[in-house]
Image (cartoon, helix red, strand yellow):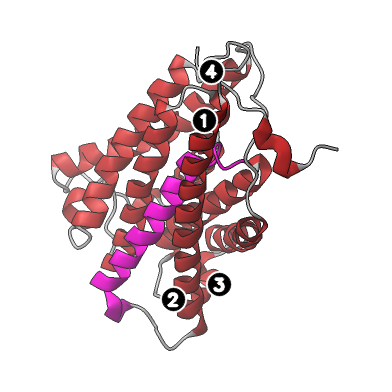
Amino acid sequence: MTDPDMRAETPVSQEDGRFRVLSRGMRILLTIAGGLVFLAGLQLFVFPERTGEFFAWTIDVPLTAAFLGAGYWASVALEWLAARERLWANARIAVPSVFVFTSLTLVATLIHLDLFHLDSSIDLSTRLATWAWIAIYASVPVFLVVLFVKQMRLPGDDPPSAFAMPRAMALVLSVHAILLPAMGAYLFVAPDSAMSLWPWSLTPLTGRAVGAWVLSLGVAAAHALWENDLRRVRVAAAGYTAIGILQAIALARFPDTVEWGEAQAIVYVVVLASMVAVGLWALWGARSSAAMERKKTPEN
């Protein structure tokens, strides 16, 4: 059995043609998806009190809109950084969480379609944005599956895993990988019951929308544990850090919305803080690992 601490002794050049590269199609999709989530984040995080004008459905609680917008803007970092990677092994952590989120959001949209801005009495620009929302969530999961199949048909293997996560980091991620999918699935499947565990009021639609985000974050945490390599989880670490910071900003903007005296508010803040801590730790570790790899790799 190979000692994990010795794996860094065999540096890998990304120019080695033996390794599977990120396909052009997947790169393009991640780039486009990053642009789309930037726009969604702009609508929700910057204008959380004007969703009746700017968004696909009206969100009555501004903190909920800001929560969703924070998720979208954090995804910009995840998807655009993944799109810039050369190797598939360093980009693929973005794909499962994006697939889970977009698929669940499509289901939530179809369940609550009557709440979306599709009525002829609504301003045309708002209706067009709503139809664009539906088209995006109906198509992105399909494109992801097709491009994933094509991606896996490309020649090459993964480079050897070189920089294992510290045990403390893996322990925190293990908690996230259990807690977040459980909470996200509960919110999505039974929002009326699960919303009592959330630190502010949700509706069935917003409960499912929040649940889709929470569940996809849990998928990212579980995937990071599976990769167990600081270099391969770098793009997810950036997204993890961003969502924790942006959610904290959202709380600071609308503090009166939260039921601060309840245990769920404390758990929420602790989870956000741990996400930022783990994300920054992983980013620092990935940077240090990359520097070590460059030093160990002989120059041509």
Q: Which mark is residue 295?
A: 1
Asked if the magenta segment contains residue 299, the reply would be: no
The residue to which callout 2 is attached is: 199
Instruction: Look at the image and give the residue range highlighted in magenta.
Output: 229-257
Using the numbered discs, state the Cα–Cα distance from disc 3 to disc 4 in whole angstroms.
Answer: 45 Å
Q: Is residue 1 left or right of residue 280?
A: right
Of labels 3 and 1, earlier in sequence is 3
Please tell me how crowded label 3 is: few (under 14), some (14-19), or many (20+) other residues with Cα within 10 Å: few
Closer to us: 233 or 73: 233
Using the numbered discs, state the Cα–Cα distance from disc 1 to disc 4 in whole angstroms.
Answer: 23 Å
Label 1 secondary element:
helix
Of labels 3 and 4, earlier in sequence is 4
- Compared with residue 195, is residue 295 higher up or lower down, i.e. above or below? above
Please tell me how crowded label 4 is: few (under 14), some (14-19), or many (20+) other residues with Cα within 10 Å: many
Q: The residue under label 3 is which amino acid type?
A: Ser
The residue to which callout 3 is attached is: 193
**Residue 5, picture quadrant:** top right
The residue to which callout 4 is attached is: 21
Labels in figure, total? 4
Residue 143 on image: x %, y % = 48, 24
Residue at the location (42% across, 59% down)? 205
Q: The residue under label 2 is which amino acid type?
A: Pro
Using the numbered discs, state the Cα–Cα distance from disc 2 to disc 1 in whole angstroms.
Answer: 47 Å
